[in-house]
Image (cartoon, helix red, strand yellow):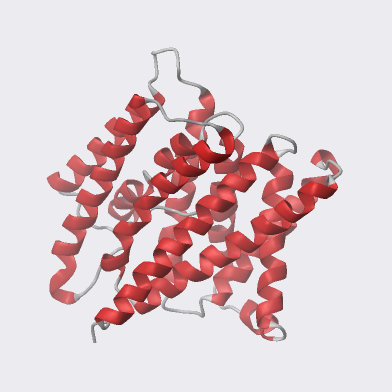
Amino acid sequence: MAPSPAATARGILLMLLAIFLFTAMDAAAKGLIQRYSFGQVVWARFTGQVVVVALILGRGALEALRTRYLGLHLVRSACQLGATGCFFASLSHIGLAEATALTDLNPIIITLGAALFLGERLGPRRIFGVVLAMVGAMIVIRPGFGVFTPAALLPLAAAVFYTANALLTRRLGPLESVWTPLIHAALFGAVITSAFQPMVWQPIAGQDIPIFLLIGCLGTGAQLCLIRAFTLAEAGAVAPFAYIGILFATGWGIVLYGEWPDTATVIGALVIVAAGLYVWHRETRARRPDDRIDDPSPRPL
């Protein structure tokens, strides 16, 4: 049964809220990374999520940990940690708008991944969308024009990690509660990053403690809003709204850090968004007869 218009509207609003929270988390992380190692900030992101989920679920947290697919959860959690780590690491070198635009290549990479690993057909229109998105990425990073930095590759790596994470999430989604991957990923990230804290830890200034706590809360809230959005509405109805993250990220960058994207970044971002929306439109039309759709929404970390 198709969702009602009211449910679809609530799903869209929750998607917008999720993207707002994700970009707010990224903006807060960028400020902290100027004073602390990115590894310490990534630790705060996952450890905070463990605490928040444990408080929400209470005794149910132990039940949520039970799974018959531990191997898949470990790989998925490693991919989510890789995506977050790469994205946060890039923020000390490039602007929020540039990093977000490059990470939003993940819908295109998902298309490639589905063709390579899930056996989906990669037709000429899909290939066109992939090529168009890569052209947009090249406009943003501009190799050979004196503005390229190796750090620009980090958001691209984040997009690849997110793609693997998204494909595994689809595999696990129908099999288990949404809380199970949420808490597994949080615990995995917290444990792995905790092992490195003796090497990277810096004492946290009193005024920064609320920001560290805020990162965990924002990340958890964003994940929950995202899950709820796709529960209330069809993926095809809410996915395109995720691209508003580029606007949010640009706004945070301007307001908090005085980062005004240059013309090439704006053009490249528009090309990437156009390619993503084109692929989403093609996927929606192709899968409409049996109501199946792959979610090509950009990430949120």
The front one of 40 and 21 is: 21
Q: Please say if 218 is above or below 11.
A: above
Residue 63 coordinates in the image, percent (x, y): 65, 84
Q: If the image is split into quadrants, where does the N terminus sit?
A: bottom left
Q: Is residue 287 shown left or right of residue 166? A: left
Residue 125 in sight here: yes
The front one of 221 and 87 is: 221
Q: Quadrant of residue 128?
A: top left
Q: Residue at image x 65%, y 55%?
A: 215
Q: Residue at image x 53%, y 30%?
A: 94
Residue 176 coordinates in the image, percent (x, y): 50, 79
Q: Quadrant of residue 3?
A: bottom left
Q: How many marks?
A: 0
Q: Residue at image x 40%, y 45%?
A: 246
Residue 169 coordinates in the image, percent (x, y): 45, 65
The front one of 120 and 224 is: 224
Residue 295 in sight here: no
Q: Is residue 219 shown left or right of residue 284? A: right
Residue 153 coordinates in the image, percent (x, y): 48, 31
Q: Residue at image x 72%, y 60%?
A: 47
